[in-house]
Image: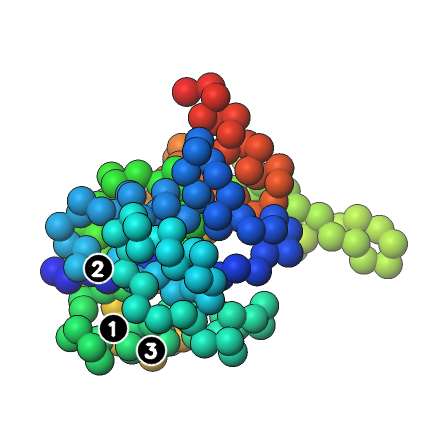
């Protein structure tokens, strides 16, 4: 099996400026994602899509493959991760041959482990290359959520004719942003990493499923490191 790891790391970030190069335990955040797949034999390359020369140089020194800087039109807030991924994938396959899967690794998930990645690849292989999406248990079940209608709180999910019992609820999961694994054909056809009936990779560890998007998230990452 031939898996292309893709790390998307642009320079701009409104909530946490320069987050991809911010040091976590003395190491730029983007390097955590490179290091986690370095020794996985199924990963043929670690391709970096960035619009920033500083990020590019950091990644090159750590073994990342950075053959170009991302086009400006794909480095805006409006550009989707799917567009960025298809651009990188198409370039790679045109220059290095086809791959069986694209493994999207966001730098904001520094604590994913090689085991998480290998478990995802195993699910991908044993389920005929169906998309694999990492998820974690949601803090709140949908049946517990509320919304405001006509200035009043009402249940977000209509409970009429529904037998509601906390012991009979199906667990609710949310994507944690750690691992997306998909075949090139599936990505190009559906323009999504999480089409219906994606295979779940359940990550139960709060640390391993941490997604850094804000300064508070970064403080949580530092807390995890300080309290091993």
- The residue singled out by tag 3 in the image is 188
- Identify the residue at horizontal 41%, vertical 38% (top origin): 27
Quadrant housing the C terminus = top left
C-alpha separation, residue under disc 3 versus residue under disc 2: 20 Å
- The residue singled out by tag 2 in the image is 45
Q: Residue furthest right?
A: 151
Q: Residues within 10 Å of mark 3 (few under 14, many from 20)?
A: some
Label 1 near label 2: C-beta < 8 Å? yes
User: Which of the two discs, 2 and 1, labels the residue nearer the N terminus?
Assistant: 2
- The residue singled out by tag 1 in the image is 92
The residue nearer to you, when weighing 218 against 143, is 218
Q: Position of residue 13 (x, y in %)?
A: 59, 56
- Identify the residue at horizontal 24%, vertical 39% (top origin): 115
User: Which of the two discs, 3 and 2, labels the residue nearer the N terminus?
Assistant: 2
Q: Position of residue 214 (x, y in %)?
A: 61, 45
Badge 3 marks a residue whose secondary structure is helix
Q: Position of residue 185 (x, y in %)?
A: 26, 76
**Image quadrant of residue 158?**
bottom right
Q: How is the image coloured?
A: rainbow
Q: Position of residue 221 (x, y in %)?
A: 50, 33
Badge 1 marks a residue whose secondary structure is helix
The residue nearer to you, when weighing 120 against 153, is 120
Q: Residue furthest top?
A: 227
Pair 1/3: label in front: 1
- Identify the residue at horizontal 51%, vertical 78% (top origin): 73
Does any portion of residue 137 appear in the rendered image?
A: no
- Identify the residue at horizontal 45%, vertical 76% (top origin): 71
Q: Residues within 10 Å of mark 1 (few under 14, many from 20)?
A: some
Vertical placement of residue 44 versus 216, above or below = below
């Amino acid at each position: 099996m031939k898996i292309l790891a893709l790390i998307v790391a642009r320079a701009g970030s409104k909530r946490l400026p320069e987050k991809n190069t911010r040091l976590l335990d003395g190491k730029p955040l983007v390097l955590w994602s490179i290091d986690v797949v370095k020794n996985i034999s199924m990963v043929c390359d670690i391709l970096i899509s960035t619009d920033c020369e500083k990020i590019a140089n950091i990644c090159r020194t750590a073994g990342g493959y950075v053959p170009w800087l991302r086009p400006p039109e794909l480095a805006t807030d409006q550009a989707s991760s799917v567009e960025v991924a298809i651009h990188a994938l198409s370039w790679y396959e045109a220059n290095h041959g086809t791959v069986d899967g694209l493994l999207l690794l966001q730098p904001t998930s520094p604590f994913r482990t090689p085991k998480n990645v290998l478990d995802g690849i195993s699910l991908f292989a044993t389920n005929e290359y169906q998309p694999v999406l990492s998820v974690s248990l949601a803090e709140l079940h949908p049946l517990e959520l509320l919304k405001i209608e006509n200035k009043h709180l009402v249940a977000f999910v209509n409970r009429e004719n529904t037998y509601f019992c906390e012991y009979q609820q199906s667990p609710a999961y949310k994507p944690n942003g750690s691992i997306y694994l998909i075949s090139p054909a599936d990505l190009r056809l559906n323009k999504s990493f999480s089409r219906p009936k994606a295979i779940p990779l359940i990550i139960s560890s709060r640390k391993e499923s941490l997604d850094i998007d804000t300064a508070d998230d970064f403080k949580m990452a530092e807390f995890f490191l300080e309290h091993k």
